[in-house]
């Protein structure tokens, strides 16, 4: 009997010294799938990401330095960058960039416009602790839930082309036996995991909505020195790529909405990329030649170049 009791106690002590932790991360495995098919990159900027909950809003709360909002921006930026589908443009900390340029005496900063703007907010955030006490054991589960809402705006029209809300959850469980074992304190990393899980659910849809719309470029110059368009290597262009040249449609006012809208244009030719130059999105260009069709050299702004849809 003594040996049996001793064996039970030893087994309990062995188990009690092991902290059992479980983290539930609802992040779907989508990053690898997105990376498989690289395409022409779109220019994207995160215009705003605010914290619309009451979490972390104390007496000295600073809306411009909200930790939850900044955390969401950093997570979303990292996930979008990992897809290798976008040229991400800084908007959140632009003042710091301009300050550094001023210190360096560099006044050659070039502003680059985005194709799409992402506007988001953390709409839900909560934490709960659940305990379970038995005769010989005690367990404690910490759970964090977060809700994130985003809007994707087409800058050329100002229209919202995608809007959705997603929720994520993360939890960790700690168990002790006979009063022995490591007790879990406040786990701040669960906040990161819950927000990351919610954002991960939206990333694939952001990618799909941006990539489903044709990539566009514009003529820079057309003279005896050649035909030049904007865009180059960092946006995914390659020598030999073919693009359609479209003459813009007529702009009319929609009496129903009061908004100006552009009627569908017509394809007037195709161009092939012959040479690329420049080092970054600000100064990249491509030299092209027409394989079919032609345009009016004096009215370059009436045309744009778009990706050939498969």
Image (cartoon, helix red, strand yellow):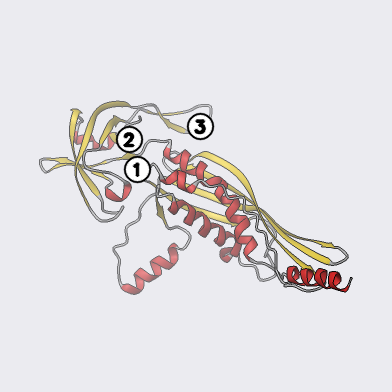
Other residues around mark 1 within 10 Å, as few (<14) / some (14–19) / many (≥20): many
Labels 2 & 3 near each other (Cβ < 8 A): no
Labels 3 & 1 near each other (Cβ < 8 A): no
Which numbered disc flags the more N-terminal residue, 3 or 1? Answer: 1
Helix or strand or loop: what does disc 1 sit on?
loop
What is the number of the mark on residue 297?
A: none
Q: Nearer the viewer, residue 155 or 82?
A: 82
Q: Is residue 224 above or below residue 270?
A: below
Residue 50, given in percent of the width and then of the height, sits at: 59, 56
Which numbered disc flags the more N-terminal residue, 1 or 2? Answer: 1
Labels 1 & 2 near each other (Cβ < 8 A): yes
| Residue 3 quadrant | bottom right
- Cα separation between marks 2 and 3: 30 Å
Q: Which residue is mark 2?
A: 307
Q: Is residue 288 left or right of residue 164?
A: left
Q: Which residue is mark 1?
A: 40
Q: Nearer the viewer, residue 221 or 228?
A: 228
| Residue 12 quadrant | bottom right
Q: Residue at x 47, y 39 (%)?
A: 208
Q: Nearer the viewer, residue 165 or 51?
A: 165
Q: Residue at x 49, y 53 (%)?
A: 79
């Amino acid at each position: 009997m003594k040996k049996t009791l001793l064996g039970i106690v030893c087994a309990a002590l062995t188990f009690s010294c092991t902290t059992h932790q479980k983290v539930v991360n609802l992040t779907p495995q989508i990053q690898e799938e997105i990376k498989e098919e690289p395409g022409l990159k779109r220019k994207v900027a995160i215009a705003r990401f605010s914290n619309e909950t009451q979490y972390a809003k104390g007496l000295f709360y600073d809306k411009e330095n909200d930790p939850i909002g900044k955390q969401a921006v950093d997570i979303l930026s990292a996930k979008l960058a990992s897809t290798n589908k976008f040229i991400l443009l800084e908007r959140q900390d632009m003042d710091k960039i301009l300050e550094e340029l001023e210190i360096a005496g560099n006044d050659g900063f070039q502003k680059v416009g985005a194709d799409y703007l992402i506007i988001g907010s953390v709409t839900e955030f909560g934490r709960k602790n659940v305990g379970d006490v038995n005769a010989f054991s005690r367990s404690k589960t910490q759970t964090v839930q977060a809700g994130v809402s985003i809007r994707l705006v087409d800058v050329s029209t100002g229209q919202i082309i995608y809007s959705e809300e997603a929720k994520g959850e993360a939890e960790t469980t700690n168990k002790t036996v006979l009063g022995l074992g490591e007790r879990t304190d406040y786990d701040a990393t669960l906040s990161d995991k819950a927000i990351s899980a919610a954002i991960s659910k939206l990333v694939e849809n952001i990618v799909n909505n941006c990539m489903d719309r044709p990539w566009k470029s514009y003529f820079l110059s057309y003279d005896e020195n050649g035909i030049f368009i904007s865009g180059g290597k960092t946006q995914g262009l390659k020598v030999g790529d073919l693009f359609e040249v479209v003459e813009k449609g007529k702009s009319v006012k929609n009496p129903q909405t009061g908004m100006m809208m552009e009627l569908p244009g017509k394809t007037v030719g195709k161009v092939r990329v012959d040479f690329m130059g420049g080092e970054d999105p600000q100064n990249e260009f491509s030299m092209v030649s027409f394989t079919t069709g032609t345009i009016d050299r004096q009215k370059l702004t009436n045309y744009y170049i778009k990706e050939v849809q498969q």
